[in-house]
Amino acid sequence: MSSIARKQILLISISNLTSDPRVLGHISVLSRLGDVTTIGFGEKPLAARNHLQLHTRRAPFRTLFLVTSLLLRIHSLSGLLLGYLPQIKEFIRKNPDSFNLICANDANTLLVGSWLRRRFGCPLWVDMHEYAPLENEGDWRWRLLFQPFATGVCRVVLPGAEIVSTVGREIQTRYEREFGRPVELIRNTAHFTPRRLLPERPRDDSRPFRLVHVGVAIRARHLENMFEAIQGLADVSLDLFLLPTDPRYYAELFNLANHQTNAHVRQPVKSDDVINILSEFDCGLITIPPTNYNYANCLPNKFFQYIQARIPVITGPIPEIGDLVTALGIGWVSETFEPLAIKTKVLEAHEHNRKEMAGRLDLAAERLARHHDDRVRERIAERLLNRSG
């Protein structure tokens, strides 16, 4: 057993940990190096030793003070008024273990992560899942209240954190340029799946050309464009496996699918099943238009899941996705995000002999598998744990 095996590690993410693939990737690696305590919504992840399950608590006066502090740009006070902070402080008081490493995820954990770092005198690893200062830039209320807060806490905390990591090269470069520090790259890759473990698909030339999209129902993603792109194509079908993040928009998509014979909105897929289910389809779709900075520069889980399922990718002109699709020869990139441009690539893919891509998809599945990014996680964690003494 290594000298750092019993180090104590605290991971914080204001998300549902058991359905957050990126955070689960961190926990998986960290749990091999020490005992991991997690703080977040949802149940305890299997690899964690201890867990604080956060709960949303309505407190009208606290909310009023929070909004006031945000409007007045008193960011340190805003951090103290965030609804989950009292729960974390009470948890720390009742569990007085000392920690050797704090892993804080996204801007809404930066202040509490910085406080815990000072309390325990240990290194802080900050993982930014998006470019936080522009996270919800399409919402004027967010721009008014939270954009200055996100920018302010990044400016205060990021330069002093021992490690900062993020999801893609453009966002990595933006953080480095704006906050004057090096940033590590950890992509949202999926576990390598050998082709032999994927379900065999019997040849059936009579079935339609099956398209698939997995993700979340968020209006800014304009998922309805995919319905329009395949409208009237009798030998093409589309299945969307969606989390109903925006229930009203989800209902609209569901109703739209009910009025279109070749489109279906499905229940979300369990993370353990997603690769096998995706492998039953012919192509994966990614057509999220650049309605904000993070969408314009995304490199999402679904891209890597499609590759592990060994299905080609049809994507809009998203730079990092498009560059990889073109360089690896594993799909098609439309000229624009308009439904007609997407339709053109769907028809091109339908006519293409996709067996020619099998070897390239196998190479891509190995090259873009999570074990490469896990090595980065492990290198970061070992360096910081060794530094903590």
Image: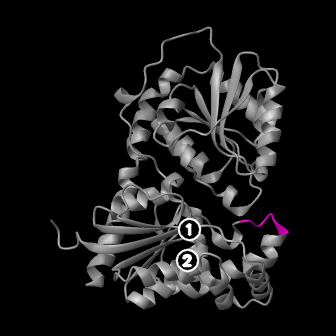
Badge 2: how crowded within 10 Å, few (<14), some, or many (20+)? some
Question: In the displayed structure, does residue 107 sit left or right of residue 200?
Answer: right
- Judged from this view, the residue extending furthest toward the left is 1
Task: Return the x and y of residue 98 as percentages of the image width and height.
Answer: 34, 83
State which quarter of the image contains the C terminus: bottom left
* Most foreground residue, 289 or 157: 157
Residue 5 shown left or right of residue 38 in the figure? left
Q: Identify the mark nearer the N-term, 2 or 1.
A: 1
Which numbered disc covers residue 87?
2
* Residue 54 badge: 1
Residue under the image location 36 percent in, 73 percent down: 9
Q: Residues within 10 Å of mark 1 (few under 14, many from 20)?
A: many
Q: How far from the left and from the top, in percent, is residue 196?
A: 35, 27
Please state the extent of the stretch shown in magenta in the rendering. Answer: 136-140
Vertical comparison of 357 with 303: above or below: above
Contact between marks 2 and 1 (CB within 8 A): the answer is yes
Hey, which quadrant is residue 101 in on the image? bottom left
Name the residue type under label 2: Gln
Taking the magenta stretch, the answer to whether it contains residue 91 is no
Task: State which quarter of the image contains the N terminus.
Answer: bottom left
Residue 236: x %, y % from top left? 70, 21
Q: Residue 68's x, y, as percent? A: 80, 86
The residue lying toward the viewer, choosing from 26 and 302, is 26
Q: Quadrant of residue 93?
A: bottom left
Q: Which quadrant of the figure has residue 87?
A: bottom right
Above-or-below relation of 237 to 384: above
Instruction: Identify the mark at residue 143; answer none if there is no mark.
Output: none
Query: Does 172 sit left or right of 351 as displayed?
Result: left
What colour scheme has been applied to the protein in the rendered image?
Answer: one colour
Kindly state the secondary structure of the residue where label 1 is placed.
Answer: loop
- How many numbered discs, if any? 2
Q: Above or below — where is 252 with respect to 32?
A: above
